[in-house]
Amino acid sequence: MPESLQQFFAARPESVGQARDFTAKTLDGWGLRARAEDIRLCVSELATNAVVHGATPGHGFLVRLDSDDDVVRLEVHDSSRQQPAVSEPTAAELSGRGLVLVAALSDGWGVEDRAPVGKIVWSCFKTLGVAGPTA
């Protein structure tokens, strides 16, 4: 059965950890543990981008998770129309790897315009046939 949950966060550095916790609790509540670490890392990267690059002054960001029988879709909504770009930082650079990680860990990602303003950066994760961790 399809499920969906979302939560709004202020554009503050500590909101990244809160978004990660929201994601972990949501996935655990849905019994989706198999790709939880990949999804948590991706929400961390996308939420960081929203805080640093995407949230205009006075606006935060929204994290939405949708699950159906075989895919989890993660969305991070922000108030900027600025499109993110995958970069190839040098080994000496301390940032710029977030979308590279999202592309490597997810089964697909992209960007959509959001009406009336802003964008949605999404990633999806196949869960069908992926075994969860054993206790």
Image (spheres, rainbow, N blue to C red):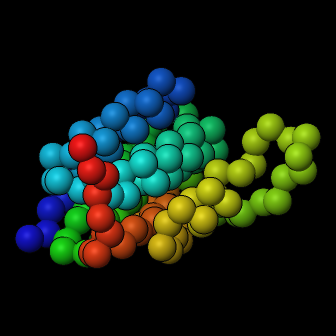
Q: Is residue 114 above or below residue 133?
A: below
Which residue is at the front of the view, 52 or 1? Answer: 1
Where residue 70 sits in the image (x, y, percent)? 25, 75
Q: In this view, does 118 lie above or below 12?
A: below
Residue at left offset 38%, top offset 30%: 18
Q: Work out which quarter of the rendered image holds the C terminus and state it.
A: top left
Whether residue 64 is visible here, answered yes or no, is: no
Q: In this view, does 98 lie to the left or right of 78?
A: right
Q: Is residue 57 above or below residue 119?
A: above
Residue at left offset 90%, top offset 50%: 90
Q: Work out which quarter of the rendered image holds the N terminus and state it.
A: bottom left
Residue at left offset 28%, top offset 58%: 132
Q: In this view, does 17 lie above or below 104?
A: above
Q: In this view, does 66 lie to the left or right of 44?
A: left
Where residue 32 sits in the image (x, y, percent)? 24, 56
| Count of numbered marks | 0
